[in-house]
Image: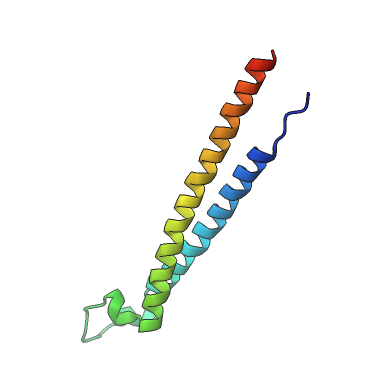
Amino acid sequence: MEIPSSPFNAGVQGFQKATEKATEAAASIAETTAYGASDFALGQADNDNTVSQNTGAGDLSDLNQSIVDLKVAEYQAKASAKVIETADENIGTLLDVTV
């Protein structure tokens, strides 16, 4: 008797896609909020470096989108883990019934 592995594969693939999406979003957040060397130049009169002052309006919308993408990836990973868990429970039940 062959046990179908498609629910496991779907869960694993979903988890991998969520990991990739989270990595991309985190890299985008880091890139958007990173300070350059010129931000810390000696003799700089204005030492109040905040993200809102260092980024333009376009950068802030990119930052917001990246944060949303990171949260979506979190929910996608949780859903994929639930798919794997459910597939495991169902296959365990099938094995108990057939043995």
* Colour pattern of the rendering: rainbow
Where residue 96 appears, x then y in whole percent? 63, 16
Residue lying farthest to the top in this orientation: 99
Quadrant into which the C terminus falls: top right
Instruction: Residue at the far front: name it.
Output: 97
- Work out which residue is located at the far right of the displayed protein and give it: 1
Can residue 39 be seen here? The reply is yes
Is residue 56 visible in the rendered image? The answer is no
Q: Where residue 50 appears, x then y in whole percent? A: 26, 75
Would you place residue 42 above or below residue 66 in this image?
below
Residue situated in front as seen by the camera: 75 or 60: 75
- At 77% from the left and 27% from the top, the residue drawn is 2
Residue in view at x 37 percent, y 71 percent: 33
Q: How many marks?
A: 0
Q: Nearer the viewer, residue 48 or 64?
A: 64
Residue 54 lies in quadrant: bottom left
Residue 17 versus residue 28 in the image, above or below = above
Task: Point out the image quarter for the N terminus.
Answer: top right
Where residue 88 appears, as percent x and y from the top left, is: 59, 30
The x and y percentages for residue 16 are 59, 50
Q: Residue at x 50, y 48 (%)?
A: 77
Query: In the displayed structure, would residue 71 be above or below residue 79?
Result: below
Residue at (60% x, 33% y) in the render: 87
